[in-house]
Amino acid sequence: MTENPATEAYDAVDVIRTKRDKHELTDGQIDWLVDAYTRGVVAEEQMSALTMAILLNGMNRDEIARWTNAMIASGERLDFSILSRPTADKHSTGGVGDKITLPLAPLVAACGVAVPQLSGRGLGHTGGTLDKLESIPGWRAALSNEEMLAQLEDVGAVICAAGSGLAPADKKLYALRDVTGTVESIPMISASIMSKKIAEGTGALVLDVKVGSGAFMKTEADARELARTMVDLGTDAGVVTTALLTDMSTPLGRGIGNALEVTESVAVLAGGGPADVVELTIALAREMLAGAGVTDVDPADALADGRAMDAWRRMIAAQGGDPDAELPVATHTEEIRADRDGVIVRMDALGVGVAAWRLGAGRARKEDPVQAGAGVYLHKTLGEQVKAGEVIATLHTDTPERFTRAIDSLDTACDGAGAIAIGSVAPERSIVIDRISAG
Amino acid sequence: MTENPATEAYDAVDVIRTKRDKHELTDGQIDWLVDAYTRGVVAEEQMSALTMAILLNGMNRDEIARWTNAMIASGERLDFSILSRPTADKHSTGGVGDKITLPLAPLVAACGVAVPQLSGRGLGHTGGTLDKLESIPGWRAALSNEEMLAQLEDVGAVICAAGSGLAPADKKLYALRDVTGTVESIPMISASIMSKKIAEGTGALVLDVKVGSGAFMKTEADARELARTMVDLGTDAGVVTTALLTDMSTPLGRGIGNALEVTESVAVLAGGGPADVVELTIALAREMLAGAGVTDVDPADALADGRAMDAWRRMIAAQGGDPDAELPVATHTEEIRADRDGVIVRMDALGVGVAAWRLGAGRARKEDPVQAGAGVYLHKTLGEQVKAGEVIATLHTDTPERFTRAIDSLDTACDGAGAIAIGSVAPERSIVIDRISAG
């Protein structure tokens, strides 16, 4: 029992106990807590205990909405209402080979909707959009708010690093959750993502919620709950929000790794590229355009006729990048070959993602560098025929001592069963599993 | 996903996730975690997340025993085997007016068993044994291990502060739990208490597990679970351990507050004092003597014939105290009077405890001083007749501005129903509710 210092409206231990004992947090408790944590009055160890209690005991829709608003209120809000076009943004919960933002942002811009895509770097086996773009010589991720607005008006698409001014409470809290085993809370994930997207000021938002071995959400039920929670949060905040539940049991496309994914994205913008990447890019573009109220443009046309590629080149050049530059190539390669004839019946996203990460495409700690050329290229992927001795995948790295552990992860993914399996019957795969909208 | 630094055998986030996901912690995880936390490798915010996960998801008997052993291994162990007598100790989970240690330690010593009573200071509405004894002019709580051993051999009883060498992991962890809302975990409470008692090296131990409004455990089921967990831990560690479940819905005795409790303890040692205090003192003394193998001495005789009082005087004097000194008296008093004739049907321990605390007998923060003279004296307590206008209680403090809030706590205890109620039928009260022994 402690008496509350008169200077603070609430006591952190009382707030922790409320959630620990499975009660609903009040609006006042949430507003105070997030603000006091940002001010440093609520200590890290207090927030981590509360966060674990939230992870285990949950928050209801009202609590999550209040928490999200408190995180938005901890920082600045952007305002795109001065732009001459409507805005739409996309957020992916992260996957293996998920380079969709790269073709998607210029494609939607080419269709007349501005795309203010604030992105992050990768941690663990899912790559980061900024890491991918940084493999383009000269390209820079850091823009001021003014530069971002000017580029949105001029080019229509910007992919840049989120400034520190948006939802600083979330930034502090995410770093804490990362080291305290409390990342995997649907209320906290939802509030974290949506606080930044709402503060960013987009008019429409489409969420790409991944499900499967390579995704953060391993089960469809969890992915569905996350999608529903975020769609509700966005809708309540006045952002036109929809979500697609999409498959992440298999990597998207053939290239996994920073420069490999840029190359594949450029192929999609040139009208080619793997079918799954094209399908998902167009599906998400349609959602963004519809959310922004643009219904008379077909994004497939803008891919086919080169308008999307033009927007890409202008977007890269506006941030100092050379769209014609050679991309970095890893110094060493190793091939994985088929040991029999058949069809690829499993290409496990987690196993491939971890392999790419171990080859140097990703980082274990925030401060680690990434290798631009490292990663995995899939000559054969799910459902494709292969002959004994044929190359299935090429591994790329600048540090060949990494090959052994990368191959380990391919051999032992799926509970030791191996990331790659050859069988006789090509499995079905739906890229878009479901669509979740407001209401 | 993080790769584990090669220098540590485990990763804190993995350990947190194990318990978060309701799995059993391995011996290796527990040993590493407690050691790494003591070394500062596991951060406070990581330990607090784990502690909340333990509070909500529990630990089984094996995990609790391993955790307790890891905390013991974090520090030194005392050894009383060189003493010429067997040793027995008592631990109370804390209550209102619980001064039992004061008459009990010299009483058991007078019966031929050495009592090494390492005690603490109070926090919140339950008083601390050291705070009570410090109201005796000259008495000092801090003894070296050598001084403690010498006094045990010479006087047979010592009540002193636990040195920082015993279970330092527990000390650090308790301070963390206190500010993170994670005190109320039966596995953690059990490990905390028993790690210190086992490290202290006593041969026998009796646990006084309180149940009721003024106790830490509000329900008999919780108190029983705590008692069972601690008896098992002690038994497994080779300490003869029993527990009494005792009533803490009503304060023990009439005096609540530091000097008021010393006065009442001296009255018990002189052969008088309140019946409930005498009954519990003798019941606990019998358990301690039996645990130490002494079955031919009746502690009631040692109270009646003055041997216990002699031991008290020698024990106080050995630590610099003057057993004949006047005790501090508060400068201000206020009386609570009956508003009708009848019998006291409720004297709520929590309400009275909070009143005494607010009068200055206890502290809100560890660094706060306590008032030696402050507290509540009950002229009438549970089951006693009272006439309208008669004084039920006197409140004592050196800071009279505290009276209002102290009276508030008496008026609004028991969910607003008031700590003191006058009715017509005297209620039953059993001091000792049950006895729990090994097996």
Image: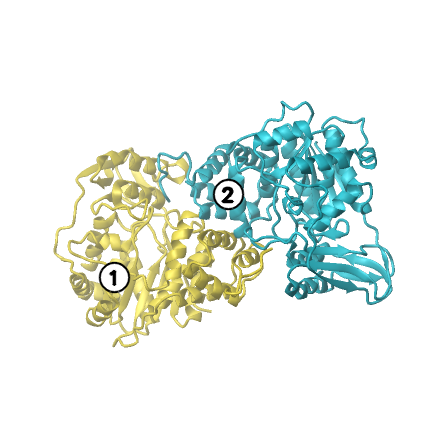
Chain colours: A cyan, B yellow
Q: Position of residue A294 (x, y in %)?
A: 76, 26
Residue drawn at point x = 52 percent, y = 56 percent: B58
Above or below, A80 against B29 in this view is: above
Give amino acid for label 2.
Lys
Q: Residues within 10 Å of mark 1 (few under 14, many from 20)?
A: many
| Chain of the residue on which disc 2 is drawn | A
- Element marked by disc 2: helix
In the rendering, at what x and y percent does residue B182 appear? Answer: 45, 50
Q: Chain of mark 1?
A: B
- Counting from the top left corner in percent of width and height, residue A305 is at 83, 34
Q: CA distance from mark 2 to mark 1?
A: 46 Å
Q: Is residue B276 toward the left or the right of residue A120 in the image?
A: left
Disc assigned to residue B159: 1
Q: Is the residue marked by circle 2 packed among few (<14), some (14-19), or many (20+) residues within 10 Å? A: few
Asked whether disc 2 touches disc 1, contact meaning CB atoms under 8 Å apart, the reply is: no
Front position in the image: A431 or A58: A431
Name the residue at 67% across, 45% down: A136
* In the depicted structure, whether residue A40 falls above or below residue B122: above
Q: Is residue A90 visible?
A: no
In this orientation, which residue lies closer to the viewer: A345 or A112?
Answer: A112
Q: Give the residue type that dot 1 points to.
A: Ile
The residue beneath circle 2 is A172
Name the foreground residue: B98 vs B193: B193
Give the quadrant of the C terminus of chain A: top right
**Vertical order, B343 against A250 (above or below):** above
Q: Picture quarter containing residue B432?
A: bottom left
Which of the two discs, 2 and 1, sits closer to the camera?
2
Q: Residue at x 22, y 37 (%)?
A: B399
